[in-house]
Amino acid sequence: MSTEHLQKRLAILATALLFAAALALTLLAARPFATAIEPEMARSVLVVGDSVSQLLSRADRLALPFDQLIGVDTLLDEVRRDNPDISYLLVVDRHGRRLYASGLPQHEPLKQRWTGAARDSATIGPWLDTALPIMGSQGQLGTLHLGQQAATVEAQLRELLFDLVTVLIVAVLTALELMRFVMAAMVAAPSAALAEGWRAVRQGDFSRYLPSDYFGGIGRLNARYNALTESLNQRAVALRVKLGDAFEHCTSGLRFHAEGERPTLFSGAVDFVRWPFFLLIFSDSLSLSFFPLYVEGFYTPAYGISRQVALGLPISIFMFAWAMAMPWAGLWCDRLGYRRAFAIGAGITTVGLLLTAVSQTLIDLVLWRSLTAVGYGLVFVTAQTYIANHTPPERRTKGMAMFLATFFAGSLSGAAIGGILADRLGHRPTFMLSAGLSLAAALFVLRFLARRRMGAAVRKSLSWRDIKLLLAHRPFLVITVLAAIPSKVALTGFLYYTAPLYLQALGNSQSAVGRVMMAYGLAIIAFSPLVAQMADKLGRHRWFVSIGGFAAAAAMFAIYFLDGTLGVALAILLLGIAHAIGVSPQLALISDYCKDAVAEVGQATATGIFRLIERLGNVLGPIIAGALIATYDFKGAFYGIGILTLVTSTIFTLAFWWLHVNDAELAEGRP
């Protein structure tokens, strides 16, 4: 069994054990919560009940007849209006005769409790009834009954179940990413370094040491290996002094390091950057499910723009700053090295998230989100470049698929957990936590990544000539304008902006919003590798892009047939499937139809320009969605994005059919 297979099996086994433990702990924690929620609900109305009870008791102390009080029904109506969670209030005498009531339903089983004298609560049909004795100077005067919807208990239990399932999914994804790193650090990297060391020794090279052992395991051999290497080099130094010039002749074919040096072997594992990349994406994505709501608190009409457009503005500017930073981020990465570039990017992201948490105006917020985007872009490009340069050429596509899987795993995990945290901690503390996780990613990279670049080629500077050359190429222009940009408009305009606002307007909690948004990332993770493999096998990339575009339009129209939260969830899931089908083959399609232009500017430069122009859709998405909401409301925004996607997908399909026919005619020699 290869080291890679062993590493994968150990990671899956460890993750399965962690999942089983988390599931057992969840079930144990859920049981006492389920039994405690009903008494806790009853306790929530006791303050109101005690207040009403004391007021009625005071009437008795004033010698007013308890069964002839005036205005009690009006008082109960006001109490119920001020406390929407109370469905009814009822006052009965000690014989169970009804005296005063507000909102009392016609439900016969309730009458069985009217004669009770104890302070208790019980579920009667669809109601949770809480009874409070009303005491007077001569004993009990009667009983106050407060009713709540018993369905609220079921709703809270259901909410708890969904939260627990969400946490379990996120725990599995997080544990899998972490275990991949641990297995790489304990098994893969030490094994590769040891194998390289022995290979060098067989060739007579005794000059290099094995790296420090962080976790034990295979790396325990390092100490003995390094001690032996150090001993041999010390003897070589002594012999060099003793023999002088004859030393080189006597040790011909052998290599030792100079005195005072200590060159160390390093085995660069892809998983060394995968875990901190996941952590940083997770940290920034904590705000995905509530960010438009956070922006809403900064809006004032004094800015001179509509509320809907203002809510999408920080998202658009974040995407714009991210897009502008990415081409230069590649140059910084080549010059600084992976370790420093990632750490600096994560540090900038940390500062941006901290300042976002303490923003006071919309202008502050936009500025700090732009700063966050610069760091985010630097980390994004550094991680992508690291994985590409540490993956063999024959496995480069698999490496990029792994990169995207890590990105979306971190994104969906952060969105789901962020909604739960925002419900319990608030928006600003959640941003503070995001900053802490981003800082942890920076410290992690400084600890584990190599201190020097591993021979990555320095890319040339981006030039306007390259951009104009690619845009003048018709297939490249068709792919970017009619496929790449619309897909990003749907992503940011619908998923990141409109969906959270609409779900909140439907009465969903922020936890529920985060859970619904998970569907997109889960669809990408589940379907993207399968679709990529199928597209490469069939070689019909243009059909996959077309199908993905039409499926994205269908996702927007799904809300027309199934309204409400379920419809939005279905639309998000379908959009994830559509992008898994249509987005991945876009780069391959450029390679198929733009070979000459790509060869002239270079593959890396062409990819960078494509990603840069593609980000225009990220910028336009919230602006288009905000304008549509302001004019046609939420459903109009869904349909508008759907129509835009449908039109561009249709034109794309026709354009590529025409290009394909022309290519076939040229190949046959017809004019």
Image: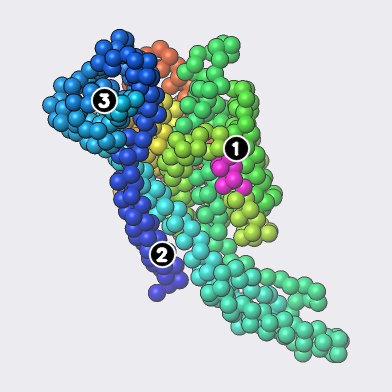
Q: Which residues are magenta?
A: 432-439
Evaluate if marks 1 and 3 touch, with contact meaning CB atoms under 8 Å apart: no
Q: Secondary structure at mark 1?
A: helix
Density class for disc 2 (Cα within 10 Å; few <14, some 14-19, many ≥20) is: some
- Measured from the top left, where is residue 541 in percent x and y? 35, 42
Near-viewer residue (142 or 457): 142
**Sooner in the amino-acid sequence: mark 1 or mark 3:** 3
Answer above or below: position of 437 versus 370: below
Residue ID for mark 1: 353
Label 3 to label 2, Cα distance in Å?
A: 61 Å
Label 3 vs label 2, nearer the camera: 3
Label 1 vs label 3, nearer the camera: 3
Residue ID for mark 2: 14
Query: Which image quadrant for residue 211?
Result: bottom right
- Measured from the top left, where is residue 299 in percent x and y? 54, 18
- Please state which amino acid type lies under the numbered disc 3: Gly
**Sooner in the amino-acid sequence: mark 2 or mark 1:** 2
Q: Secondary structure at mark 3?
A: strand
Answer above or below: position of 486 versus 449: above
**Sooner in the amino-acid sequence: mark 3 or mark 2:** 2
Near-viewer residue (607 or 334): 334
Residue ID for mark 3: 142
Answer above or below: position of 231 versus 143: below
